[in-house]
Amino acid sequence: MPFLLAPGPRRKRSAPASPPTSPPASAPASAPPAAPPAARSGGESGPSPHRSTFRPDIEGLRAVAVLCVLAFHAEIPGTAGGFIGVDVFFVISGYLITGLLVREAISTGRIRLGDFFSRRARRLLPSAAVVLAAVAVAGAWLTVPLRRTDLEYDVLAAALSVANWRFVSQQTDYLAAGHDQSPLLHFWSLAVEEQFYLFWAPLLAVAVLCTARALRRGRAVRAVVALVTGVLVLGSFALSLYWTEHSVSLAYLGTPSRVWQFGVGALLALLPWHLLRGPRPLRLLCGWGGAVAIGWCVVAYDASTPYPGYAALVPTLATAAVILAAIPGRGERNVQGAYGVGRLLAGRGPRAVGRLSYNLYLWHWPVIVLAEARLGTLGWPAKTALTLAAVLPALATMRWVEQPLRRSRTVSELPRRGLSVGISAIVLPVVLALVVGTATLHMMGPATPVDVKGLPPGAASGPSLLARVPGAPVADGGPVVPSPAQARKDFPPDQGCQVAPEVTRSPQCLFGAVDSPDRIVLLGDSHAGQWFSPMLALASQRGWALQELVKQGCPLPQLAVDSPQLGRAYRECDTWRADTLDRLRTGPRPRLIVIASLNRYTEDRQLLTAAWERTLKPLRETGAPIVYIEGTPVPGTDIPACVSGSPDDDAACAFDRADAVPADPLARRIAAGKVPGVRSISVNPVLCPGDGPTCPAVRDRVLLYRDDAHLTNVAAVVLTPRLERLLTDAGALPATTPEPSTPAAPGADGWTELLRDDFDGPAGSRPSPANWQYDIGTCYPGCPAPQWGTGEIETMTDSTDNVRLDGKGALEIVPTRRGGEWSSGRIETVRSDFAPPPGGVLRIEASIALPDVTGPEAAGYWPAFWTLGASLRDGYTGWPGVGELDIMESVNGRDTVFGTMHCGVLDGGPCEEPVGLTSGPQPCATCRTEFHSYAVEVDLGAGEVRWYLDGRVYHRVSADRMDAGTWKRTVDHGVFLILNVAIGGKLPEADGATAGPETEPGHPMRVDRVTVSVKDGG
């Protein structure tokens, strides 16, 4: 804001009517002495170069500007255009700063940049620092943790005068929408002004140097600066028009598109307006016309006004008219007149508000926003009261911070002291923000991507979100997945295929089996894009491709809408939609088209029905089945932020059902048989179960929403089995698994087979998704144990480079290395309910050939076949108490294998952790070159666990090695199986080797079969 000049000394009642000459507050304490008459070059044009006449009307105009902004922020009815107060400030700033610098240049022949920035620093930065520090501290108390981290980033940006660019990046990013407003949003205009100072003063200093030898220095300085200013005004205004058309956030908040408004003020200070004496009625008309135009903008403009654009001309030129009306002519000291608008603005009341305007502007918005953060949404009377209350801290800051530093002879004596004050005012809030922000981030935990492959299985039907595993405890407590910090970034991993608002054509965006002639097309806006992961999984299971055709904020029904990011009619949406429908109509026929779209673009049901029909008609012409996924609940509030403040209370962030799940018009028409060729499915019964007044934000410890409207990718992945069942039941997808049959009968030997996988399939294909799921990355969701808790160095992937069938009846898990980075494969059974019957036996067996590599080339290789207790999937914590049975392990290419039980506690305990109850190395000279059988039997009747190599028992652990409770928690429950090849880690290191340059990638562990069987006791 242009709070650049202090009020002039108050006139005594006996003083003359004209205001005394007064130096600006940002200038030295006394104005430079006037040059002798002979030296007054250029005095014939422009504001007098030898005196700084205080303009009380401008101080009152500052009051008008700040009151416009305050009324707008308080949402007082009839003031929707109050945002133009910022434009008024910009014009005033350009006028005052340019006049100050030009007077100095004419009087002294140079511009002292050190003095200039010293004045700016001690005038503006201390008050801003107080507000930023107060917000940083108050935010720690009044805001929830996730919002607090955003706030501390805002403090950093505001302190460094780049707040406008931070908010540009947020408001132009569609996927970052849905967050609460920042209490420092208003600092964008301060950042614009600070950036203008940093650019304008050096530019004028260079211009002055170019005219140093001119005979008529004053005229030369003003001519050069006016020429430069004119070019900048035209260029900036043209850019403003362009950005207003293409990116309204950039146009509104960006410095380049606002420079022209400062330039208009600068031209007022440069051109010879005082030679245009004109009749007094013309001055009156100019001044009052400008004032009326400002008031008209406040009333007539609103959020729908394309701004700044051409609309900004009105308040900008109106402000210039008010200033121009009172510019004194040659020899004049006072041109206000009895009826001029300047006389009204120069009154005590407006001037008092004008003096306070800077601090009041700083304080009012944080007071409103932080109050709403604690109390909820407030109406305009409450916001008005809070704005009035902000006068108190504003007065205190002006009285005890701004004025003492501005008037201090010690500080103003040397420029470096003022600069030191400014630097200190920057460092203080930065340090506070770093301290509070770091503490908050530490408390919230890392925001690393969620490993969705390790998520617990979702329920295909029923009221529960997650599948209920017999014998496994129900998730109740523990951290939510994803964490609030992770949820903010838990987007579908679609590699940018949800095209941005300015893009008019989707790329090919094929995923999965991209060479397959069959594909699923996912079509719509971001509410369709949230289903990317489930659709990719369903397509991949069938050997199909997935094509994603999604555009952010673009309704799939043919509606004309505006884009909040672009700030205008969303023409790109219409172009994209037409192009996409044409591609589908003329391209290869998909196996399935899945459509989804937010159902809130219009409340006109007839308009929406017609718009949908215009879209569905060309889709029907493709001949492909069409399935509409009903719109999911829209909470309307920042769910991750709310959950971060109440992590242990699932009900705290529940939201209103009526607003979040309105009737879906298209789904109703489909159900009534009025939309031929389209089927509808819905997952809302599990997202918002029952018929109560609210919907949950968290179910089964899964955080459902990443913002105020979209599902987290974790929630979408967990819903995959349910979507598969719904699509299969609707006849849109072929089933991939046989219909449920009666349980297998025991064989002649008494064993009942629960699982058998012989890994038959084409070479290079994936293992059966009905039996196996992938672990991806370096840890389970939430990363409770980085590097899988063992120190291994590879990254697990689902690529067929690492996990594939060999086409000859075997599975291959292959470690690879690219660019020095290791990748490998780790799969686990979908089922986690493999458990011994009461008093009976569970047998798990695999036929495996270890990686055929030895010596230094095998350093760090760690193949394994093992199990973990099912309860680990309920949060991925609790090891080793959940029980682990290592059926086969081998390290570093040795001709040995071993088996181990882990249980109890992390250190010591009955299983002697962290080593475990191990068999020790067992010789196996041909285990690398031939398949051998590895098995474990959990025998509850005999009270022991037995390890087998080719049918020979080589290791036993009996129940009497530990207490009954530990034994039960270790073996008497469901387990899931894991096959993997790790690289590096603690176990290979303990064996005397670790992965290095000589370690040779590409040697697979081959698995011929895996079986799980049980036998009843007796």
Image (spheres, rainbow, N blue to C red):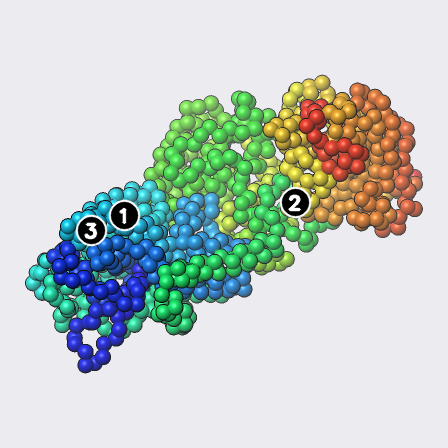
Where is residue 992, by image quadrant? top right
Picture quarter with the C terminus: top right
Tell whether label 2 touches label 1 (CB within 8 Å): no
Residue at the extreme left of the image, as rendered: 279
For the residue labelled by badge 1, is the local secondary structure a helix, a strand or a loop? Answer: helix
- Image coordinates of residue 138 in percent, x first then y, are 50, 64
Horizontal side, residue 414 vs residue 300: left or right: right
Classed neighbour count for the residue bearing mark 1: other residues with Cα under 10 Å, few (<14), some (14–19), many (≥20): some
Residue type (three-letter) at the residue carrying disc 1? Val
Horizontal side, residue 721 vs residue 127: left or right: right
Instruction: Determine which residue is flagged by label 2.
Output: 783
Horizontal side, residue 403 vs residue 914: left or right: left
Nearer to me, 505 or 231: 231
Q: Tell me which residue sits at (79%, 20%) in the image.
A: 929
The answer to whether 368 is drawn above or below residue 751 in the figure is below
Q: Measure how far apart labels 1 and 3 are at the Cα level.
A: 10 Å
Residue type (three-letter) at the residue carrying disc 3? Val
Tell whether label 3 touches label 2 (CB within 8 Å): no
Residue at the extreme bottom of the image, as rendered: 14
Q: Measure how far apart labels 2 and 3 are at the Cα level.
A: 64 Å
Instruction: Determine which residue is flagged by label 3.
Output: 221
Is residue 681 visible to the viewer in this orientation of the structure? Answer: yes
For the residue labelled by badge 2, is the local secondary structure a helix, a strand or a loop? Answer: loop
Which label's residue is closer to the chain start, 1 or 3?
1
Nearer to me, 76 or 308: 308
Tell whether label 3 touches label 1 (CB within 8 Å): no
Instruction: Determine which residue is flagged by label 1.
Output: 206
Q: Tell me which residue sits at (48%, 24%) in the image.
A: 589
Residue type (three-letter) at the residue carrying disc 2? Cys
